[in-house]
Amino acid sequence: MARRKQSSHAWVFVIWGINGIAIISLLVVSAFYTTSLRASAAKGSNQTPRPGETRKIPPTSYFLPTLTPNPFYTPPVFETSTPFVLENGQRPTIIGFSLAGRPIETYTFGAGEKEYLIVAGIHGGYEGNTVALANELITYINAKPETIPTDVTLYIIRNMNPDGEARSHDVDGRVNNNGVDLNRNFPSGNWTADWDRNGCWIFRPTTGGAYPGSEPETRSVMSFIHSHRIEAMISYHSAALGIFPGGVPWEAASKRLASALGKVTGYPYPPIDTGCEYTGTLADWAVENGVGAAVDMELSTHKETDFDRNLKALKVLLGFMP
Ligand SMILES: [Zn+2]
């Protein structure tokens, strides 16, 4: 009895051993089968893609849709307070965005080797007539391209502070959305966050920025100027103080440009001295960074565009050799 018992035990182990091996190999085979099914299914769907939906993208949309939307993405605001569209003309180049995501638009005319630049609207809606002037110039040149000499390229940044312009067309529209005076935010040699307000604009609190070049609007214009070789530029302001040459102290070529512009426009040059010290201005930074000549030029009022006077100014600018 004892022997039979022993041998039957041995058989039980052998049989369960075979069963075990069979079960394991079945599992392995079924696992392989499932994965290969999945792979072939994926292959099949790649081979027969369904056509995508046709999608109408608005002309001002510059971002293509992504497959996986980023939950932290804030869509840019594609509008300006005074939407400007050039009928039968070019679309602007976007050189950057304001704090609120408004585009900073640049129009390019001509294709010559000598590059000139006009910047308007640095003080937003408070000096909104400079933007209106830029729009008038853009419309005029588009209709009369012969205005631009063949050896010249002209860039017009029509509204450098679109948030300020959208906010209001009075004293509240001067600064950007951080409360920064953009014409005191450029990293020129004399930049300061604060300044003596004697003789300066005092109607609202404002600063030169957290640090030089802190604002996106400033950096957009800086990188634009860095990527071009600008012979001469006008930064438009209002109102009435005249023409301020760039440079600390005023640089010779900029003084020459200011004087020539003063003669044709009648705007005061030398400018009216209110005792204000200007720091971190676009014109100062520009001449310190390779622009041949630069001026801040003020229109005669906060309302009029002085178009005829500034058409003459345009001719002086485009013929100017620094
Ligand atoms: Zn101004």
Image (spheres, rainbow, N blue to C red):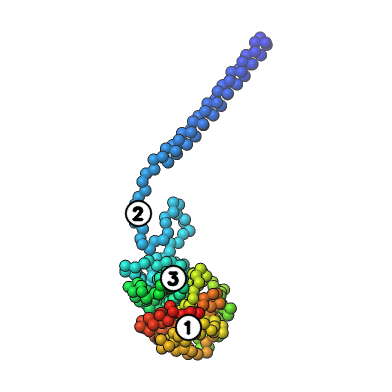
| Mark 1: amino acid | Leu
Q: Earlier in the sequence, mark 2 or mark 3?
A: 2
* Res 257 label: 1
The percent coordinates of residue 142 (x first, y second) are: 35, 72
Bin the neighbour count of mark 2 within 10 Å (Cα to Cα): few under 14, some 14-19, many 20 and up.
Answer: few
Residue located at (54% from left, 29% from top): 28
Name the residue: 42% across, 66% down. 93
Determine contact: label 2, label 3, CB under 8 Å: no
Secondary structure of the residue carrying tag 2 is loop
Q: From this view, report whether residue 114 is shown above or below residue 240.
A: above
Q: CA distance from mark 1 to mark 3?
A: 20 Å
The residue mark sitting in front, 2 or 1, is 1
Q: Earlier in the sequence, mark 1 or mark 3?
A: 3
Q: Which amino acid type is marked by label 3?
A: Gly
Image quadrant containing the N terminus: top right
Label 2 to label 1: alpha-carbon separation: 50 Å
Residue located 40% across and 75% down the image: 149
Q: Which mark is residue 55?
A: 2
Residue 52, label in figure: none
Residue 172 sits above or below residue 8 on the image: below
